[in-house]
Each structure stands twice: as C-alpha cells, then as structure tokens.
Amino acid sequence: QVQLVESGGGLVQPGGSLRLSCAASGSIVRINSMGWYRQAPGTQREVAARIFSSGSADYADSVKGRFTISRDDAKNTVYLQMDSLKPEDTAVYCCHTVVLTTGYWRTLWGQGTLVTVSS
C-alpha cells in the first residue's frame, strides 16, 4: 500500500511565501510524475505544477515565475515553493503522483492542504 502525506499549507499575506511538501511511502518501486493540483471554491481543479522522473517540470501559466516544484527521489518527496503569493492562489492544494508498486502502476492523491492568501 502506498500513501501520500502532505504538509505546509496555511494562511499567508499577499506577497508572502509557503512551501508545500508531499511524501510518498509504502511499496514503491518507482515514481513517475509527482505534482500539485489546486482547486479554488467554485472552480475546476487545475494543475499548478508537475515534475517528471526526467526532472522536467511544467507549470500553470498563472504560477510561472513564482512557484518552483522540485523532488527528492531518495525521500520520495515533492516540494512546491510558492513565492509572491496572490489572493487568487487561495485554494486546496492536492498532491498527485503516479507510482509503480508491486506489479502495477497506481495514481494517488493526497488529502489536500488549504492555502489561504489574505491580508
């Protein structure tokens, strides 16, 4: 069984920074992609940032230049450094990963962590 544990959400003022972490644990053979999706009230879930096993990453246009995604393969952990936060970044952020467990690939979601950007 594989689990995702997220941390790092909270309340921050506009212009501030937060760092989200998501650690995968369990019977992991290999991790393909890891990423963060977000959903604000009344909107559809969108990809904020993703990083692939190659190390390449992609970002939503709205966060480019402000968010940085990284991964530590030794710890099966993905990080999202969020700088210059704006009120419109307020959302529930969910970790997402595609992992190879014992014999098959699985898509997993974290429980979500709330990020609130407000003065």
Image (cartoon, rainbow, N blue to C red):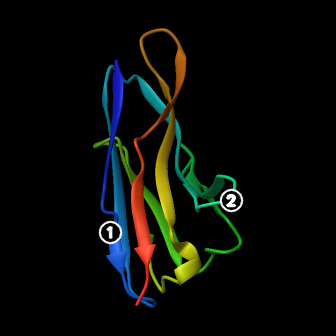
In this rendering, the label closer to the viewer, 2 or 1: 2
State left or right for residue 42 relative to residue 69: right
- Viewer-closest of 29 and 17: 17
Q: Which residue is mark 2?
A: 43
Task: Relative to 38, say whether 63 is above or below.
Answer: below
Label 1 SS: strand
Q: Which mark is residue 10?
A: 1
Residue that extends furthest to the top in the rendered view of this protein: 103
Task: Please state, as top left, top right, bottom left or bottom right, where the N terminus lies in the image.
Answer: top left
Looking at the rendered structure, the kind of residue marked 2 is: Thr
Residue 112 percent across, percent down from the top left: 42, 49
Which of the two discs, 2 and 1, labels the residue nearer the N terminus?
A: 1
Q: Residue at x 42, y 73 (%)?
A: 116
Q: Give the x, y percent position of residue 15.
A: 45, 91
Residue lying at 52% horizontally and 22% vertically, measured from the top left: 106
Q: What kind of residue is marked 1?
A: Gly
